[in-house]
Image (tube, coloured by chain):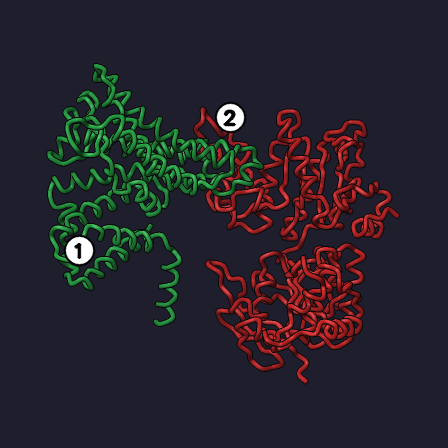
Amino acid sequence: MNPIVVEFQDVTKVFGNSKANDQLSFKIKRNSIHALVGENGAGKSTAMKILFGLVSADSGKILIDGKPERIHSTLRARALGLGMVHQHFVLATEHSALENVLFSETVSPFQILNRTQKKIEYQKLAEQYGFQIPWDKSVAELSVGEQQRVEILKVLQQKARLLILDEPTAVLTPQEVLGFFKNLQELKNQGCTIVLITHKLKEVLAICDTVTVIRQGHAVQTLAVADTNQDQLAEMMVGRRIQWSRRELNPGTSAPKQNEPILKIPAHQPLAFQVNAGEVVGVAGVEGNGQTELIEAILNIKKAQASKIHMGVFPEDRLRVGSVPKASVMENFILGFDSDPAFCNHGWLRWNEVKKSTVESLQKYDVRPVSPELPFEQFSGGNQQKIIVARELCRNPEFILAAQPTRGVDVGAVEFIHEELLRAQERGAGILLISFDLDELLKLSARILVLFNKKFVLELDRENFNELELGRAMGSGART
Amino acid sequence: MRKTFFGFLFGLFFAIGLTFLAGENPWNVFLILAHSAFGSRYDFGQTLFYATPLIFCGLSVAWAFRVGLFNIGAEGQLTLGCLAAAWFGGVPTEWHRGSALAVGMICPLLAGGAWGFVAGWMKARRLAHEVIVTMMLNFVAAALASYVVLNLIPNPATQNPESIPLPPQFLFKHQDPIAQVFPESSVSFALVLAILLAIGSWFVFHKSQLGYRIKMVGMNATAAARAGISVEKTQMIAMTIAGALAGAVAWAEVLGSSGQFRLGFSPDYGFLGIAVALMAQNNPLGILLSGLLLGALHKGAGDLDMETAHITRDFSKVLQAFIVLSVASPGLWSLLRRKFKRHA
């Protein structure tokens, strides 16, 4: 048997003006866990979509088991033994886990599916890989980890031998990640090949055998995980040396003025909390456990007492609620500040001033390119976020709501945004940091609150931080 | 811009090509069209006469488009505006020239603006869909106009469905420089006002805080609301101004030309305004051009009726349809280009 299952040869895909894949070439070994790493927009998802027949390549070849294949549809991909689990699950939430797997059966429309028999079959398959799935519960009742296992089983049921997993750990708690890694190992032991799309280098080092680094649509290098380390991979991803913060971080412990609440939601309300001046308070929790409600509550405070405290808001979803993507950077830069007398004179905007001030900020925050008239959406994720950071921080707010401040942002920009937040904190601003990324919270917060089921269930001070305890609270709301 | 231009040519030639199927010589049809739209000073004057209301309505639709709303109601708004102007024919007062002009020019704006505001208010505050609301308000306006013209201020001198003519103090007529350039034709000073309003709209869109807010709300209402811009207020303001602009059609039709409300005077100016705005991609200066083009088509197609054997006045609708379709579908061009590339 050919030891190489999949080989990309000079695959190129152009979207509009940008090359998502530029002569991408790499090989995936049979029976291995292969990571594809790269920054957002580097082209890793596009490459996998091409492999799975969702997108057609403009040029180049894909070899499966050494034979060139034209994969023009997902049906063809499935026939070749490929399976893909998308980042956002494709499940019918009202239906049971069993029914969801049944949906993925490719049988004649006239064939009768015997549920009992199929359930036994699936159960056997699940046991084979060490999965536990509550078959009769509706998907909406399952935990995220269980939903993911249903997705994977859907793929396995189709006899897939090569599994493509797109950012599989993004929604899991630390405990679930550990369980998930065990599942992956088991799958590999049973002869499957796994392709993991991720940007978390820690996971690559923990579980993968080989790794391909993709930058600007091009494969920088494929190497054995044993021969590399986090710094080297990060450098390859970004294309330059990362300035890991050498500064001693002490978020909020630098004399937080304990009884000086900058922002407070009083105790009788469901989401009661308090942020003091010069303190970073982290909010951990799995997506959908009350983050939206928390943000709404804070925005209502902002609306109600607009003049009292000056608030900066990093929106949780910059393209949907934080910007006008098709408008220019200038226009986005004054979004929310268009009444500022520096920019507005009796109802007429002083575009020259706006432009000057935008250019200054773009330079100060190292946004590239410095083109104030370019549409916002044409900047990379990291640069978009930097523009928002610039907009919100350049007026020195006393309170900052940072919701997912580094979501979809490249490694270099993550460091930059963290630095800016800590600088604001040193200046005395109170910061509420809402994030799905536990590492980010552990790094920046003086305190961490855990959201579960729209309530705060746990509060830990920095000296008591414990990843497993936080994970348990995130996953089940349990306190101990 | 280039796509719009080619889209226009494509639609025009395709539609004219169709006349071949009706047994006409397309080239001949094109010549008649061109000649009847631009052939003489009178013809060009009539073209401009049709273009004026189209520019007003195009601006109206564009204002609504900018804030993200689809104003199907320009027709109703202009009906109300013309009604408000014609109403003074039934008011037996001695008018001074100045006050008559001022009242005659402002009332249509107020009436059209009010009609637009109703739609904007129902959209913003009651969450009614603006397309449904404006369309229904068109019917209300049409019925209201029939009632008022036939029952309250009918012209006693004729049997025609029209209102009492306005006293001459209201009309632009004798002091109208545009009318003097194009003697005999119906074009009036309203054309100059339309051009001024288009330029004014351009400045508001691009230079003012209001224009900025309208654009932000139109492109991403959620983000605008987060940034503290009142989406409801902005929508209501834009719809009110849109209504007032459509109401300004009264300047061209009533004050500048007929001096009365003739039922059925509008060849769907309000709906053609959508095409005008679409072709110009909501750019007020582009609307001047697209209004002129559609005005020329309307004038030209009217003469086709008389000068050819098989083509009726309705052909102008066919022409407009093809032009709007080919201009408004940018996807068409990328499709054609891809096909062309594949074969090349």
- 1 or 2: mark nearer the eye: 1
Query: Where A135 falls versus B196 (above or below)?
Result: below
Q: Position of residue A397 (x, y in %)?
A: 65, 32
The one of B49 and A258 positioned closer to us in this rendering: B49
Image-based side of A233 in relation to B76, left or right:
right
Residue displayed at 58% across by 82% down: A67
Is label 2 in a helix, a strand or a loop? loop
Q: Chain of mark 2?
A: A
Q: Disc 1 residue type?
A: Ile
Classify mark 1: residues with Cα within 10 Å, few (<14), some (14-19) or many (20+). many
Viewer-closest of A173 and A407:
A173
Q: Amino acid at mark 2?
A: Pro
Residue B65 in the image, given as x and y percentages of width and height: 41, 41
The one of A457 and A371 positioned closer to us in this rendering: A457
Between A347 and A302, the one lying in front of the other is A302
Q: Position of residue A116 (x, y in %)?
A: 74, 72
Q: Which residue is mark 2?
A: A341
Please name the residue that numbered disc 1 is placed on: B311
The colour chain A appears in is: red
